[in-house]
Amino acid sequence: MTIENKPDSLEDLFAHNRAWSSRMERDRPGFFTSLVKQQTPKYMWIGCSDSRVPANQITGLEPGEVFVHRNVANIVVHSDLNALSAIQFAVERLKVQHIMVVGHYGCSGVQAALEGARIGIADNWLRHIQDVRDRHHVMLDSLPEAARANALCELNVAEQVVNVAVSTVMQDAWSRNQSVTIHGWAFGVHDGLIQDLELTVDGTKPMENQYRAAVQRIRYKWSKPADTGTSEYIK
Ligand code: CO
């Protein structure tokens, strides 16, 4: 579907769906029948609900290949039964090998948290990002203003990677030597590219040093002058 051919009604959505279904069945006979039997995704994606960050399209993965959990600003709260259930299902039932926590530049949730803007009930959800902001306020205050939202986006990813890693689900998986690796990524809405923040946690060693190194890289990266073009991330 091209941008010029955007659907503008619900009828269009059904029409596109029928066309997609018959195209898939024509090109790959038996595709849907095999999907019915099982899903065996290797990947779990924890990302923002933002409509510009669709997990499958960005990564070229097909139905059946990535298990997705999304919420506003890709937050994994210790007591969020929704996120924890999704992670447990992915790890224990589907046996995914990789979990990627994916933030994105230009995230309005991160921006609102940074500014302390009042939205409504979501303020309470975004309070978790404000906690991240407050934890790193010395670093954020030292950065050029235009870089702060990008830095907070990446810091939020780092914190959420840690939150996944310390969950009972991951601790239990690693204690039985299940191989699952957590990754921290950031997606650029402006260029369509994923950046690996290189905070990759597999339970084999304490992650404090990796976390600290990731935070230092974020500080170094965003303390560069804005004329490197990085300020273009701010939308
Ligand atoms: Co977002």
Image: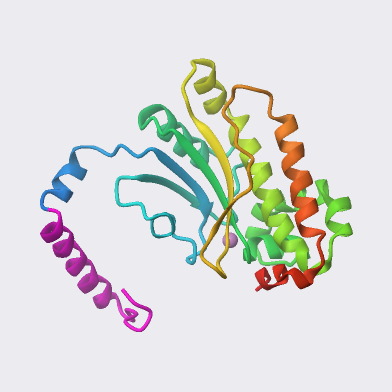
- Quarter of the image for the C terminus: give it: bottom right
Q: Is residue 78 visible?
A: no
Q: Position of residue 204 (x, y in %)?
A: 60, 22
Which residue sits at x=13%, y=63%?
A: 22
Residue 28: quadrant of the picture: bottom left
Residue drawn 52% across and 52% down? 47
Specify how the rendered protein is coloured: rainbow
- Residue 226 located within the stretch drawn in magenta: no
Span colored in magenta = 1-28
Q: Is residue 129 left or right of residue 196?
A: right
Q: Is residue 30 visible?
A: yes
Q: Is residue 25 magenta?
A: yes
Task: Give above or below for 178 relative to 182.
Answer: above
**Magenta stretch: helix, strand or loop mostly:** helix
- Work out which quarter of the rendered image holds the N terminus and state it: bottom left
| Residue 160: x %, y % from top left | 63, 43
Identify which residue is drawn at 68% across, 52% down. Answer: 154
Q: Is residue 231 left or right of residue 83?
A: right
In the rendering, at what x and y percent does residue 26 appear?
A: 11, 60
User: At 74% across and 30% down in the image, what residue appears?
Assistant: 208
Q: Quadrant of residue 117?
A: bottom right
